[in-house]
Image (cartoon, rainbow, N blue to C red):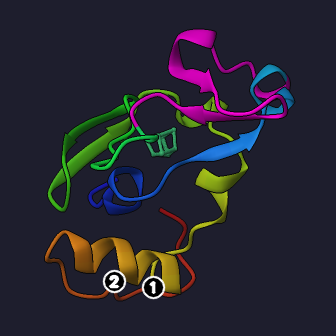
Amino acid sequence: MHCGACCAHFRVSFYWAEALENGLPEAWYEALTPTLACMQGTNSPSPRCAALEGEVGHAVRCRVYAQRTSPCRQVLAGDEQCRKARTSHGLPPAVHPLTSH
Ligand code: SF4
């Protein structure tokens, strides 16, 4: 991964059972509501997922890539969410619209 802007822009929330289904360790997420959880670090005015390693827009790595939940799998490079996140980091729009982050 070389972007990571969406991992440092949105609150990354999901139905809590997804974490169990995906084998995501508890240390990486927190309860948000009785049914929702979110990635540690993303429920903040300046969100940045605790699992994101590296520098946004240069070289990043997801420490839980294989266990990541649905919101992480849904953002596509070049889609609206991607554009919003990249703009917030001062990055130009992504080039490949069908490449997942
Ligand atoms: S779990 Fe990985 S892909 Fe999802 S927001 Fe965090 S760093 Fe990004």
Instruction: Determine the secondary structure under disc 2.
Output: loop
- Tell me if label 2 and label 1 are in contact, CB under 8 Å: yes
What residue is drawn where x is 20% and y is 54%?
56
Q: Is residue 53 left or right of residue 96?
A: left
- Tell me where residue 3 appears, x and y as whole percent: 29, 61
Residue at 38%, 83% in the rendered image: 83
Residue occupied by mark 1? 78
- Check the image and report above or below for 62 versus 29: below
Residue 49: % across, % down: 39, 38
Res 35 → quadrant: top right
Q: The disc labelled 1 sits on which kind of residue?
A: Gly
**Nearest the eye: 48 or 79:** 48
- Front residue of this view, candidates 101 and 86: 86
Secondary structure beneath disc 1?
A: loop
- Residue 28 position (above or below residue 78): above
Report how far apart the C-alphas of labels 2 and 1 lie in the structure.
5 Å
- Of mark 2 and mark 1, the one earlier in the sequence is 1
Q: Image check: 59 left or right of 78?
A: left
Residue highlighted by disc 2: 94
Label 2 crowd (10 A; few <14 / some 14-19 / many >=20): some
Report if residue 45 is visible in the image: yes
